[in-house]
C-alpha cells in the first residue's frame, strides 16, 4: 500500500531552510575574499589562482541552491511572507556571491600589484566588508525564529536591531572606501592609467559586497514590516 | 422476511467480517494520518505512538464512538421507506461496507488522500438511491453532514490559530521563553485533558450508564484535567535548558519543554480519531445486526451493543499493528516542519474539533480537520509553507470518493440481491 500523507505533503516544501543554506554558502564564499588580497599583496600568483577557484566553486554552489529554491517554489504555496519579497531577498543574497566572483575574476584577469601604501587600508576595507556580509548572514539565520514568532514581537525587534547594526557597518565601509579612493586619486599620476581604472572598479566592487549585504538586511526588514 | 430468518447467521457473519475489514483498513491507514503529527514533531517515537494509538483509539471508539455510529447506521437512510423489505437494508449495509473497504484499498494503492468517512457516506447514499429510491435518503441529514465537512476544518483552523497566538503572547514573546514555557506548560496540558473530557462527558455516555449534568461534567473534566496537568508538570520539570541548542535556534529549549505536551495531545488525537472513525466500520455492521436480531425490524430502536464498539476498536488496533506502523514510520520522517509547539496547536485543535463532532454525531474526516488545523497555524504565519495544491487535492478526492463509493456499493447491492433472493 502506497500512502500519501496529506499532512506530510501539506508541509512539503518550506523555502526557508534552503534560504538559510544559500546564505551560509554565500557567506563562506565571501570569507575567501581576504585571502585573495593576501595573495595579491604577497605577490603569490599560485595562491591567487587557487583562491579564485575556491570562490568560483562556492558561487556555483550558491547558484545551485538558488535555482533549487526557485524550482521548488510553486505558485500554490501559502507562505508567511510574500513570495515576491522572498525571491527578491534570494536575488540580493545571491548578488553578494556574484560580486565576490567578479572581484576574484578581475584579479586574475590582469596582472596587478597593490599601489604603495594602500596595502594596509585595503586589507582593512576588505575585512570590514566581509564582516558586513557576515552580519547579514547571521540575520538570515534568524528566519526560523521569525517564523516561530510569526514575524512579530521580540524576535522581530531583535532582527530590526541587527539590521540597524548591519547598516552602521555598511556606513563604515563606505567611509573606508572613500578614503581609499582619495588616496588612489592622489597617486593617479604615478600609476598606469589602466591600473587606476582597474583599482577604481575593484574598490567599487569590494564596497559592493557590503552594499548588497545591507540590502539583505533591508529586505529582511520588509518581511517583518508586512 | 424469510430471507432474514433463513440467512440471518450468514448475514451477521458477513457483517462482522466486512466490518472488521473496514476497521482494519482504518487502522492500517487512517490512524497513521492522525498520529503523524506527534510522530513528525519528534515528540513520540513510532513505537510509543502505536501503544498510545492502541489504547486511546480503543477508548475513543468505546467511550465516545456511539453517536457517530448511530448517524451512520440509521441517520442517513430513512427506515420507513423500506419497512416492508428489511433484507434491502441488510444487503445495502453489507454492500456499503465492502464497497468502502475496496475503494479505500484502491485509493490507498494509488496514493489518493481519501477519507474513510467520505467513502462510507458515499457508499450508503449510493446503495440507497440505486436500490431503494431517491427518497430513501435522509437528505436533510446529508446536508448537515456535508456542511460539517466544510465547517469542521474551519473550526480546527480557528482553534489552532488562537492556540498559536496564545503561545506567542505568553511564551515566545517574553524575556525568558523557556521559564514561561515551564510555567504555562501544565496549563496547556490541562487544556488538553479538560477540553477533551468535557466534550466527551457533556451529554453523558449512554451505553456506559454514565449520566452527568452540565455542572457535574465541568467538575469531573476539571479534576481529570488537573490530574493530567500534574503528570505533565512532572514531565516538564525534568526538561532542562539546553544552551548549546539555543545558540543555534533560540527556541530550542522551549520546543523541548513542549515535547512532553505532545504526548498528551497524541493521546487526545487517538481518542478523537477512535471516537469518530470507528463508526465507519461498525455503523453498517450494527445496522445489519439490529435488523437480523429483531427478525426484520428496520426501525433499529435497540441500542448499540457494546461488544460491537469493542469489535470496531479491536479491528482498528489490528490494522495499526499489522500495517499502520509502517505507514507511521514513513510519515514520521517526513513531517519535520512540525515543531512541538506547532504540533501541539494543530493536534489539540484537531482533536477537540473531532471529539466535538463525534459527540454531536457528525462523521467528519479526521485528516481534513488536521489539515485545517495546520492551515490555522499557517495563518498565524507559524509554518514555512503550506502547499495549497494538497488542499485542492483533498477537495477533489472527496468529490470523486462520494460517487465512486456510491456506484461500487450499488453494484455490490445488486450482486447480493442476485445471490440471496
Image: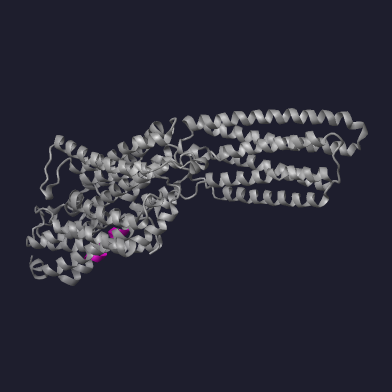
| Nearest the eye: A44 or A3 | A44
Residue span colored magenta: B404-413
| Residue B30 visible somewhere in the drawing | no
| Nearest the eye: B421 or B330 | B330
Give the left or right position of residue B6, taking residue A155 as reference: left
**Magenta stretch contains residue B406:** yes
Q: Position of residue B333 (x, y in %)?
A: 43, 55
The residue shown at (27%, 40%) is B229
Q: Position of residue A173 (x, y in %)?
A: 71, 31
The residue shown at (32%, 61%) is B28
Residue A92: quarter of image: top right
User: Colour mode?
Assistant: one colour
Number of numbered labels in the structure image = 0
**Magenta stretch contains residue B379:** no
Q: Examine the rendered structure and indicate whether residue A144 appears above or below residue A3.
A: above
Dividing the image into 4 quarters, which one contains the N terminus of chain A?
A: bottom left
Q: Residue furthest bottom?
A: B419
Q: Position of residue B318 (x, y in %)?
A: 27, 63
Give the left or right position of residue A2, taking residue B351 as reference: right
Give the left or right position of residue A122, taking residue B187 as reference: right
The residue shown at (40%, 56%) is B331
Q: Examine the rendered structure and indicate whether residue B255 appears above or below residue B70.
A: above
Q: Position of residue B123 (x, y in %)?
A: 26, 58
| Residue A133 visible somewhere in the drawing | yes
Amino acid at each position: 500500500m502506497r500512502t500519501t500523507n496529506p499532512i506530510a505533503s501539506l508541509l512539503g516544501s518550506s523555502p526557508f531552510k534552503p534560504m538559510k543554506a544559500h546564505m551560509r554558502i554565500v557567506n563562506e564564499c565571501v570569507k575567501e575574499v581576504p585571502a585573495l588580497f593576501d595573495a595579491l599583496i604577497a605577490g603569490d600568483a599560485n595562491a591567487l589562482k587557487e583562491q579564485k577557484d575556491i570562490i568560483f566553486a562556492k558561487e556555483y554552489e550558491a547558484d545551485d541552491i538558488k535555482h533549487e529554491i526557485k524550482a521548488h517554489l510553486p505558485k500554490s504555496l501559502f507562505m508567511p511572507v510574500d513570495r515576491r519579497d522572498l525571491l527578491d531577498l534570494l536575488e540580493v543574497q545571491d548578488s553578494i556571491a556574484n560580486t565576490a566572483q567578479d572581484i576574484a575574476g578581475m584579479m586574475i584577469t590582469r596582472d596587478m600589484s597593490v599601489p604603495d601604501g594602500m596595502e594596509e587600508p585595503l586589507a582593512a576595507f576588505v575585512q570590514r566588508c566581509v564582516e558586513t556580509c557576515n552580519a547579514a548572514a547571521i540575520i538570515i539565520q534568524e528566519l526560523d525564529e521569525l517564523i516561530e514568532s510569526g514575524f512579530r514581537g521580540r524576535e522581530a525587534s531583535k532582527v530590526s536591531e541587527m539590521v540597524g547594526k548591519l547598516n552602521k557597518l555598511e556606513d563604515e565601509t563606505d567611509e573606508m572606501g572613500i578614503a581609499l579612493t582619495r588616496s588612489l586619486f592622489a597617486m593617479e599620476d604615478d600609476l598606469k592609467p589602466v591600473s587606476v581604472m582597474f583599482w577604481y572598479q575593484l574598490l567599487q566592487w569590494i564596497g559592493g559586497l557590503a552594499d548588497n549585504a545591507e540590502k539583505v538586511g533591508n529586505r529582511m526588514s520588509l518581511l517583518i514590516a508586512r | 422476511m424469510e430471507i432474514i430468518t433463513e440467512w440471518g447467521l450468514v448475514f451477521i457473519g458477513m457483517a462482522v467480517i466486512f466490518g472488521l475489514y473496514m476497521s482494519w483498513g482504518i487502522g492500517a491507514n487512517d490512524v497513521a494520518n492522525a498520529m503523524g503529527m506527534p510522530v513528525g514533531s519528534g515528540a513520540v517515537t513510532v513505537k510509543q505512538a502505536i501503544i498510545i494509538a492502541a489504547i486511546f483509539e480503543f477508548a475513543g471508539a468505546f467511550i465516545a464512538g456511539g453517536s457517530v455510529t448511530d448517524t451512520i447506521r440509521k441517520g442517513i437512510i430513512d427506515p420507513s421507506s423500506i419497512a416492508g423489505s428489511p433484507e434491502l437494508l441488510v444487503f445495502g449495509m453489507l454492500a456499503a461496507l465492502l464497497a468502502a473497504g475496496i475503494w479505500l484499498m484502491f485509493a490507498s494503492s494509488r496514493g489518493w488522500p481519501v477519507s474513510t468517512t467520505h467513502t462510507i457516506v458515499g457508499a450508503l447514499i449510493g446503495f440507497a438511491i440505486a436500490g431503494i429510491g431517491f427518497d430513501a435518503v435522509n437528505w436533510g441529514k446529508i446536508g448537515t453532514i456535508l456542511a460539517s465537512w466544510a465547517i469542521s476544518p474551519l473550526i480546527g483552523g480557528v482553534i489552532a490559530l488562537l492556540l498559536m497566538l496564545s503561545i506567542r503572547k505568553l511564551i515566545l514573546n517574553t524575556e525568558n521563553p523557556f521559564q514561561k514555557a515551564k510555567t504555562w506548560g501544565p496549563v496547556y496540558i490541562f487544556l488538553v485533558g479538560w477540553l477533551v473530557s468535557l466534550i466527551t462527558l457533556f451529554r453523558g455516555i449512554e451505553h456506559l450508564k454514565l449520566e452527568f449534568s452540565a455542572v457535574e461534567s465541568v467538575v469531573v473534566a476539571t479534576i481529570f484535567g488537573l490530574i493530567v496537568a500534574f503528570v505533565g508538570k512532572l514531565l516538564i520539570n525534568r526538561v532542562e535548558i539546553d544552551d548549546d541548542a539555543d545558540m543555534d535556534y533560540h527556541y530550542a529549549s522551549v520546543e523541548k519543554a513542549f515535547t512532553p505536551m505532545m504526548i498528551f495531545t497524541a493521546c487526545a488525537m487517538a481518542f478523537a480519531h477512535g471516537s469518530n472513525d470507528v463508526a465507519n466500520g461498525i455503523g453498517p455492521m450494527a445496522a445489519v445486526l439490529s435488523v437480523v436480531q429483531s427478525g426484520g425490524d428496520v426501525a433499529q430502536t435497540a441500542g448499540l451493543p457494546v461488544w460491537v464498539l469493542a469489535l470496531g476498536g479491536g479491528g482498528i488496533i489490528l490494522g495499526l499493528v499489522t500495517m499502520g506502523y509502517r505507514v507511521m514510520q514513513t510519515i514520521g520522517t517526513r513531517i519535520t516542519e512540525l515543531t512541538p509547539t506547532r504540533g501541539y496547536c494543530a493536534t489539540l485543535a484537531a482533536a477537540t474539533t473531532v471529539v466535538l463532532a463525534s459527540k454531536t454525531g457528525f462523521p467528519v474526516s479526521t485528516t481534513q480537520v488536521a489539515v485545517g488545523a495546520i492551515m490555522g497555524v499557517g495563518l498565524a504565519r507559524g509554518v514555512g509553507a503550506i502547499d495549497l495544491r494538497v488542499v485542492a487535492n483533498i477537495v477533489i478526492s472527496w468529490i470523486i470518493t462520494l460517487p465512486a463509493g456510491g456506484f461500487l456499493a450499488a453494484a455490490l447491492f445488486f450482486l447480493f440481491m442476485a445471490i440471496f433472493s
